[in-house]
């Protein structure tokens, strides 16, 4: 079940609030002694995160399906998407699974039960397994926003306590407020440079059109540049995949792409998705001060549109 982006949190007794974690959404599936960890696009991540699989094996249930988020935490408990992407470069981080919903328990399907009942059943299943609970945040909507902002976290999820679980849908029963500006974008090209790339060109789909959003240079380390280049070089294209390039106006990196600059770009199949943080959208529909956070293997390129 997916949350819809909003620009204000709903309020009322039927709403509960949780931290919006900066990680990978996943399902933990336990069936007797067998444990699986599946991404939102159904990739098997069990071997990638063995500590989470080990914790799932200790769940207090013979069979269970738990919805949650894979998160990398620093020593102060702060989530880091970049650390999750490049765990070898961030040895001080711990990878954990925050659970926030219980979809199946033993032989019972709970998806039609209200969220508040699913959460009540979730806590004893987690017990001391090592799978963490995404706790409900107390207070009014503004108090929650103030607290989450002060901690520098990504945002807040609001959910109706009475909501049923509807897989794959973005309805108004679950909504998310992003407190820092970031979203996923499709990579359509890159400018060659040190360690393979100097900048990536990203965009989003509007119908069948891939629309250009920004040239992104910030956020890369030499190690990350090499890793991203290794994945992009197998996707080389001769033609530009963006529907709205070149741009007519000259611009700094981050804005449009002139016909002269087009010759500097290596185009790629729009097959990789990047998480990007930015300050704002400009009047001409580009990102201002964009920074690369990491690649998202859990998102399909055709899913990526401009978030409002």
Image: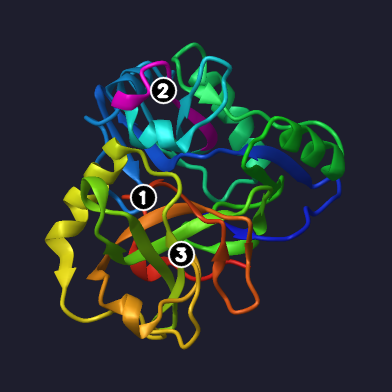
Q: CA distance from mark 3 to mark 1?
A: 23 Å
Q: CA distance from mark 1 to mark 2?
A: 31 Å
Which residue lies under the disc numbered 2? Answer: 61
- Secondary-structure class at tag 3: loop
Which residue lies under the disc numbered 3? Answer: 253
Looking at the picture, tell me which residue is in the foreground, 269 or 233: 233
| Relative to 213, residue 32 above or below | above
Q: Quadrant of the C terminus?
A: bottom right
* Badge 3 or badge 2: first in the primary sequence: 2
**Pair 3/1: label in front:** 3
- Secondary-structure class at tag 1: loop
**Pair 1/2: label in front:** 1
Residue at 34% x, 62% y is: 300
Binning the other alpha carbons within 10 Å of mark 3 as few (below 14), some (14 to 19) or many (20 upward) gives some
Asked whether disc 3 touches disc 1, contact meaning CB atoms under 8 Å apart, the reply is no
Residue at 61% x, 64% y is: 171
- Secondary-structure class at tag 2: loop
Q: Position of residue 203 (x, y in %)?
A: 42, 70
Which residue lies under the disc numbered 1? Answer: 296
Would residue 292 be counted in the magenta stretch?
no
Looking at the picture, tell me which residue is in the foreground, 285 or 207: 285
Give, as a single range, the part of the protein colored magenta: 88-101
Q: Residue furthest left?
A: 234
* Badge 1 or badge 2: first in the primary sequence: 2
Q: Please say whether residue 36 is visible from this viewpoint.
A: yes
């Amino acid at each position: 079940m997916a949350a819809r982006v909003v620009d204000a949190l709903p309020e009322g007794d039927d709403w509960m609030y949780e931290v919006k974690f900066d990680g990978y959404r996943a399902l933990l599936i336990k069936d007797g002694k067998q444990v699986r960890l599946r991404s939102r696009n159904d990739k098997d991540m069990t071997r990638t995160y063995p500590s989470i699989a080990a914790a799932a094996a200790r769940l207090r249930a013979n069979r269970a399906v738990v919805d949650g988020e894979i998160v990398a935490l620093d020593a102060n408990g702060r989530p880091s998407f970049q650390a999750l992407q490049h765990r070898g470069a961030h040895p001080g981080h711990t990878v954990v699974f925050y659970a926030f919903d219980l979809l199946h328990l033993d032989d019972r399907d709970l998806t039609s039960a209200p969220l508040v009942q699913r959460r009540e059943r979730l806590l004893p299943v987690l017990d001391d397994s090592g799978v963490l609970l995404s706790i409900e945040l107390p207070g009014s909507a503004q108090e929650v926003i103030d607290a989450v902002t002060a901690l520098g976290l990504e945002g807040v999820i609001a959910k109706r306590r009475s909501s049923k679980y509807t897989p794959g849908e973005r309805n108004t029963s679950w909504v998310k407020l992003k407190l820092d500006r970031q979203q996923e974008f499709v990579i359509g090209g890159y400018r060659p440079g040190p360690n393979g790339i100097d900048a990536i060109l990203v965009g989003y789909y509007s119908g069948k059109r891939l629309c250009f959003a920004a040239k992104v240079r910030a956020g890369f380390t030499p190690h990350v540049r090499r890793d991203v280049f290794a994945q992009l070089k197998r996707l080389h294209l001769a033609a530009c995949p963006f529907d709205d390039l070149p741009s007519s106006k000259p611009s700094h990196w981050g804005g449009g792409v002139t016909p002269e600059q087009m010759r500097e770009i290596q185009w790629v199949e729009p097959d990789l998705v990047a998480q990007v943080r930015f300050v704002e959208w400009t009047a001409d529909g580009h990102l201002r001060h964009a920074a690369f956070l990491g690649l998202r293997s859990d998102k399909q390129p055709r899913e990526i549109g401009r978030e409002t």
